Image (tube, rainbow, N blue to C red):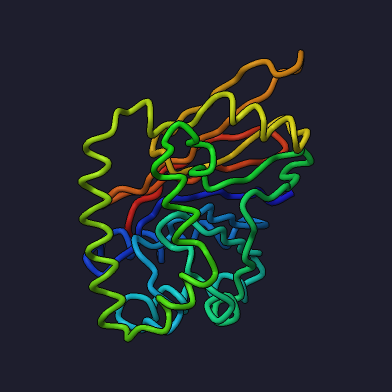
Amino acid sequence: MPDTLFISDLHLAPDRPVTVECFIGFLVRRARQAQALYILGDLFDAWIGDDDDQPPYPEIRAALRGLTESGTDCYLMHGNRDFLIGRSFARDTGCKLLSDPTLAEPAGIPTLLMHGDLLCTDDVPYQKFRRRIRNPIARRLFLWKPLAQRRAIAADYRRKSGVAIAEKTPAIMDVSQRTVEEYMRRFSVQRLIHGHTHRPADHSFVLDGNPVTRLVLAEWQADRGEVLVVSEDGWEREEIRPG
């Protein structure tokens, strides 16, 4: 049975050409061997609307379309950087948009899929900001603005986000174990897969007397990426390189 692949936090952008090359190569080669690819948020460093056609976005769309036409299912979840990906992008690429969280059964094991920012409940200012910018009215007003204005707003957001992150402690920006347990208990799952925190690791613990696992996906670096491969034999992490 073909395996299932999970990635997140690629942060693709015009100023990251090597990472874009690495991702497109991954779609053309490794991903086509899989039954399904799940992208759990932050595929892009900033997505300002499906009408943004500056390079390399058309090339990325075409590569994703090539993957889905090859027979590999591709599922895409919004992250905190690209929550404006919409139906037009999904239609162009053949990707299927997922809600956060989503319940799946890779290799027959009940698994909860999330981007991960909803688990960081100790970061109260971020959670308030998240609710505000994802308000449907706020999203609609932003998308009505000209592309150039949206790019400027996104650049300013990234700058302010960098400052805010620098002022926070690592513990605040990580997931809350209590929140993790609440989500896993609510969905009755043995496994949780997420990204966002950029702290790849396998966390095993006991929940209500049962062994469970939280798998954290890696952020893609400038010249390499990582994919979590789930099969009937378990899971493993593979390194992805350009070329």
Rendering quarter of residue 199: top left
Q: Position of residue 37 (x, y in %)?
A: 59, 57
The image shows residue 239, relative to residue 42, as above or below, that is above
Residue at image position (38%, 48%) is 225
| Residue at left offset 61%, top offset 52% | 100
Q: Residue at x 73, y 30 (%)?
A: 185
Question: Which of 156 and 227 lies nearest the eye of the viewer?
Answer: 156
How many labels sit on residues?
0
Q: Nearer the viewer, residue 236 or 49?
A: 49
Name above or below for residue 146 compared with residue 100.
below
Quadrant where the image shows the C terminus? bottom left
Give the side of residue 7 with respect to residue 18, left or right.
right
Is 231 situated left or right of 6 in this image?
right
Estimate the x, y position of residue 223 in percent, counting from the top left: 27, 51
Residue 228 to residue 52: above or below: above
Q: Observer-nearest residue: 110 or 28?
A: 110
Residue 127 x %, y %: 46, 45
Q: Nearer the viewer, residue 181 or 21?
A: 181
State the residue at coordinates (26%, 80%).
149
Task: Where is residue 15? Give x, y as percent.
Answer: 21, 65
Q: Is residue 94 above or below residue 162?
A: below
